[in-house]
Image (cartoon, rainbow, N blue to C red):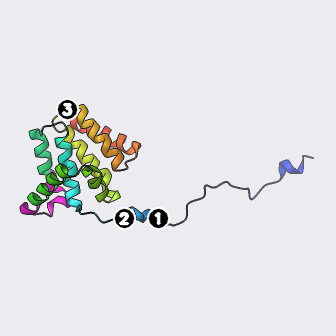
Amino acid sequence: MSDPSETSQTLFTTLTVEEKPGFTLKDLVSEFPDHQSDWTIPEAFLCLVLSAAFADGRVAPQEQEEIRALAHRSRTLKNLDENELAHANSVVLKRRSDRPDWLSEACEALPSDMRLSVFTHCLDISLADGVLVPAEAEFLEQLIVKLNIKAEDARMVSRVISLKHRY
């Protein structure tokens, strides 16, 4: 006869399960910071896409076209009429020239769930003229850090947008 331990059928075994974190509202702290910003979301968004175009020291016609198209299709900007868009543009230009920390301020003003798409738009605009120069790459790398974008997400977006502009 065989050993009872070999023939016994274990009905229940101990499982090691990764413990899921409990519900916490701490994640909402970044969505509702304790400091007020004078940046609106459209101003911050416009600041970053314009800065992507300005990063190499010139704004190519293709970059201008991309920004204009974005202003017409982006929910954040298309709700602004021409006068509001022009006002936001002037506010952005003034803050860029007057404030040394304008980039951090603009990035912090964006909701966290909007940041990856804004980075994507900035990369798209930077590649609109068919080249990516070191100054544009440096700006985009600053965005990755300041917008708190995961390296894996930035890599994925970069692959997709570079393919878009290649063909």
Q: Mark 1 packing: few (<14 Cα in 10 Å), some, or many (20+)? A: few
Q: Nearer the viewer, residue 113 or 156?
A: 113
User: Where in the figure is residue 14, as x and y percent of width and height?
Assistant: 72, 56
Task: Look at discs 3 and 2 and give the one toward the viewer.
Answer: 2
Q: Is there a contact, CB below 8 Å, between mark 1 and mark 2?
A: no
Q: Quadrant of residue 145?
A: top left
Disc 1/disc 2 C-alpha distance (Å): 11 Å
Task: Look at discs 3 and 1 and give the one toward the viewer.
Answer: 1
Residue type at numbered disc 2: Pro
Q: Mark 3 packing: few (<14 Cα in 10 Å), some, or many (20+)? A: few
User: Where in the figure is residue 81, as x and y percent of width and height?
Assistant: 9, 63
Residue type at numbered disc 3: Val
Q: Say what secondary structure mark 3 lies in.
A: loop
Q: Nearer the viewer, residue 29 or 36?
A: 36
Q: Quadrant of the C terminus?
A: top left
Question: Is residue 11 something one can see in this rendering?
Answer: yes
> Which dot marks residue 26?
1
Q: Say what secondary structure mark 1 lies in.
A: helix
Rendered residue at 86%/50% (across/down): 5
- Please give the residue where the numbered disc 3 appears in the rendered image: 131
Report the magenta residues as a range. 70-84
Disc 3/disc 1 C-alpha distance (Å): 41 Å
Task: Report the side of 23 relative to 82 (left or right).
Answer: right
Q: Nearer the viewer, residue 11 or 151?
A: 151
- How many marks on residues? 3
First-in-chain label (3 vs 1): 1
Rendered residue at 20%/59% (across/down): 42
Task: Report the side of 68 relative to 118 (left or right).
Answer: left
Residue type at numbered disc 1: Lys
- Please give the residue where the numbered disc 2 appears in the rendered image: 33
First-in-chain label (3 vs 2): 2
